[in-house]
Image: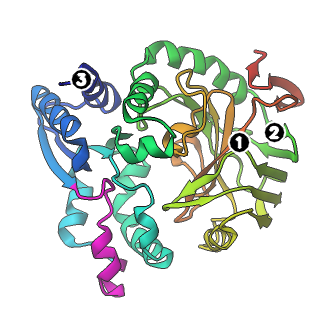
Amino acid sequence: MSDSRVEQYAKLLVETCIDVQPGWQVLVTGGVLARPLLEEVSRVVARRGAYAIMRPNLTGYATNIGWLQEAPEELLDTPAAIESHAWETVDGLVSIEAPENTRELAAVPSERLMRYQRGLRPHQQRIFTHELKWVGCQYPTPALAQDADLPLAAFADFLYGACLLDWDAEGERMSRYAERFEAADEVRIVAADTDVRLSIAGRPFKVDAGGANMPGGEFFTSPVEDSAEGEIVFGEFPAVYAGRDVAGIRLRFEGGKVVDASAETNEDFLLEQLDLDEGARRLGELGIGCNPGITRHMKNTLFDEKIDGTVHLALGNGLLDVGGTNESQLHWDIVKEMRAEGSRIELDGEIVQESGRWLL
């Protein structure tokens, strides 16, 4: 039986998130388990008078894992010419994650994966500058449902409930909060075992309400690169990156840089990422989660970073469109619970959120 929500979802991605225009070439990528959405996105692109260039993949991720495991190392440094041409010429991208196994990337040695990503990055600059209109999203699969400890039907309800919102209304609500942050010079995040200060002076905030990520439901900036001071413990939720779970992350900052770090699990992986390059120990993003449809952790960063009543910090690469200058191959969003009693966000000494509740 067809699900009418798939049609609504496809229209949201094509018409709202990237606003496909006549004549555009739109790359449509996704796992084979997302076939209903891949087909519906292609139909909506066609109705907009544009080309849908379909690129299904086997594992549900855009990365060709089998090739990455076996290719000679020198090939990892530069993408194939036809791949570079695609990134440099397409007008739009709809990227749909539909994994059969959310830990599939763990089969690729991290040094090979990082080398491949480093080689691809110069050819994907249009993504980072948003010259290429793009949206990343997910389709409900058994693997994602299992990670969330939900039956597949319940996970589908959750996914569509978080995505099919009134994004005009959500954007207006979040813009009020973002304006108050933009008027401030310093953010202080306080919780159990956590007290960290970040300068946001002169940095604009961007509201994600139906843009490059779906679901949306956050506002964010890149904090001043040398400003982070203090300690933060991400003790509530495991951080998921490159197919690994890292629980109990603790980071201490001085002069904007991580000077001490530990984790309860996979600490070696955390330290490896921090040493990836010069920019990996600095922050590229501060985000505030606001999506009313996301109220609990799902072990799924695309959703978890938007949990209403959380903040997230991203280690590594900064965001050009909000003034970020830090450069790194890494961009790892790590989510902090702020709904616990006594947790608070301060702007220039004024408490603006306490125990997850806005005071603005």
Q: Earlier in the sequence, mark 3 or mark 1?
A: 3
Q: Earlier in the sequence, mark 2 or mark 3?
A: 3
Q: Nearer the viewer, mark 1 or mark 2?
A: 1
Q: Quadrant of the N terminus?
A: top left
Image height check: is 23 above or below 253? above
Does the stretch in magenta take in 69? yes
Q: Which residue is located at x 78 percent, y 57 percent?
A: 250
Q: Name the residue nearer the viewer: 32 or 171.
A: 32
- Mark 1 = which residue? 336
Would you call the spot at circle 3 few (<14 residues within 10 Å), some (14-19), or many (20 or more)? few
- Mark 3 = which residue? 3
Label 1 residue SS: strand
Give the farthest residue toward the front. 151
Q: Is residue 36 left or right of residue 169?
A: left
Q: Are marks 1 and 2 in contact (CB under 8 Å)?
A: yes
Q: Are marks 2 and 3 in contact (CB under 8 Å)?
A: no
- Mark 2 = which residue? 189
The type of residue carrying mark 1 is Lys
Q: Quadrant of the C terminus?
A: top right
Does the stretch in magenta take in 136? no
Would you call the spot at circle 2 few (<14 residues within 10 Å), some (14-19), or many (20 or more)? many
